[in-house]
Amino acid sequence: MNPRPASSVRADANRRRILDVAVAELLRDPDASMDQIARAAGVVRRTVYGHFPSRDALIEAIVERAVAAVESAHAAGREGIDDPAEAVASSLLAVWDVADRYRLLLSLAQRSVTMSGIRERLGHVHESGMEMFRRGLEDGTFVSPLPTRALGYVLEGILFAVMEAVNDGVVPAEKAGRSTAITFLTAAGLPASQATELVTRVADRRVATRATTDG
């Protein structure tokens, strides 16, 4: 296989850097302009527009990157876990670690991508989540008067609502992941004490695993 041209490699590196800087700048200032992002990335405005013809196109690209990261985290979080409640807790905590980086961009994304569009992009995550909820409802782990798909919509709404609450300063960011997971499980019918114990155990295990990996 022939090596890629150096110009193509540089273009890809520039695009990745622009996206990285754009996320940081938009987190700092949701109204950041393309000029601000170009300056922060150390490139001229023409370079930014060469990759992203508009601000909406740039935000779309950030959403696509976030979706890919969420899909990967969700799959890794539930891998090898058979218990539905634990799978939900572990996958949600894994997703929150990723989604928290993009939460301040949610309102921006909603201007250019409808909620139905966001749900469509997260189709794989949505369907695997539905499967976890279905198994939990069938084996009695979860209890809800709602059918599986409707329960999934409610729980997804909780996730987006907590992101907005963190953005507005109503919920401390450092507590939001665990709080969201507990709220998910209690909304699905798990007793609050059981949900809290499970989420604490799963979250502590994730912290210990990261410490071992980093060490």
Image: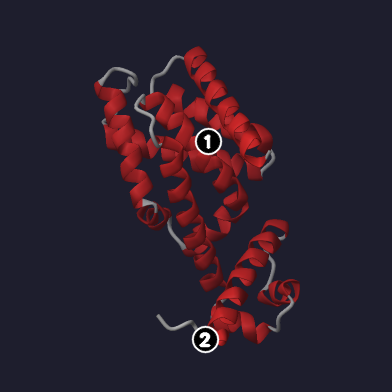
**Quadrant containing the N terminus in the rendered view:** bottom left
Give the spatial CA distance, label 2 vs label 1.
40 Å
Q: Which residue is mark 1?
A: 93
Label placed on residue 131:
none
Picture layout, residue 77 above or below residue 112: above
In percent of width and height, residue 75 lies at: 41, 43
In percent of width and height, residue 93 lies at: 53, 35
In percent of width and height, residue 164 lies at: 58, 44
Identify the residue at horizontal 41%, vertical 30% (top origin): 87
Question: Looking at numbered disc 1 in the image, what kind of residue is underneath it?
Answer: Leu
Question: Looking at numbered disc 2 in the image, what kind of residue is underneath it?
Answer: Pro
Q: Which residue is mark 2?
A: 5
**Quadrant containing the C terminus in the rendered view:** top right
Identify the residue at horizontal 32%, vertical 31% (top origin): 133
In percent of width and height, residue 162 lies at: 56, 38
Drawn side of residue 148 relative to residue 20, left or right: left
**Residue 171 visible here:** no
